[in-house]
Amino acid sequence: MKKDISDIEDIKLMVNAFYDQIREDEVLGPIFNGIIQDRWSQHLEKMYTFWQTILLEEHTYFGSPFPPHAKLPVDASHFEQWLQLFNQNIDNLFEGTKADEAKWRAAKMAQMFQIKIDYIQQKGFKSIV
């Protein structure tokens, strides 16, 4: 029986397993690996604090998650793949209220990021980064 997400170790497991998949993914891997390059440990640390803040209500993340993503060369298909991998990862590892919340929050975040990136791409605005 799977357990729910309940502490920082669960967050680290969730994040590490997800980004292991991302790095190997044919669609998303080249984008993430190309931008993050050799800074994966820093990125993962930031993701731990982000999800710790969101899911565990332990406020360790400070920053704005969207600006680093504003210039990404992505479209709806990338967000669909990202969300599919995210949900698959959660379902493989966890079950429960927090696991469901993680999937819901990821879907909302993907939707908002996609809307903002589409708007920037269509209007030709310079990134806010």
Image: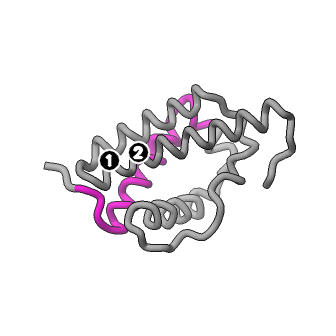
Does the CB distance between marks 2 and 1 fall below 8 Å?
A: yes
The part of the image, by quadrant, that contains residue 92 is top left
**In x, y percent, where is residue 75?**
65, 29
What SS does tag 1 mark?
Answer: helix
Q: Tell me the tag on residue 100.
A: 1
Q: Residue at x 43, y 73 (%)?
A: 58
**In x, y percent, where is residue 77?**
58, 26
**In x, y percent, where is residue 86?**
43, 41
In the rendered view, tell whether residue 95 sits above or below residue 41. Answer: above
Position of residue 85 in the picture relative to residue 123 (left or right): left
Q: What whole-number distance in Å separates the C-alpha atoms at marks 2 and 1?
A: 6 Å
Looking at the figure, which quarter contains the C terminus?
Answer: bottom right
The part of the image, by quadrant, that contains residue 122 is top right
Mark 1 residue crowding within 10 angstroms, few (<14) / some (14–19) / many (20+)? some
Q: In the rendered structure, does residue 29 fall within the stretch colored magenta?
A: yes
Q: Main secondary structure of the magenta part?
A: helix
Name the amino acid type tagged 2.
Trp
What segment carries the magenta color?
4-30
The part of the image, by quadrant, that contains residue 124 is top right
What SS does tag 2 mark?
Answer: helix
Name the amino acid type tagged 1.
Asp
Position of residue 82 in the picture relative to residue 119 (left or right): left
Q: Residue at x 76, y 43 (%)?
A: 71
Query: Which colouring convention does the figure follow?
Result: one colour
Position of residue 116 in the picture relative to residue 110 (left or right): right
In the picture as drawn, the residue positioned furthest to the bottom comes out as 59
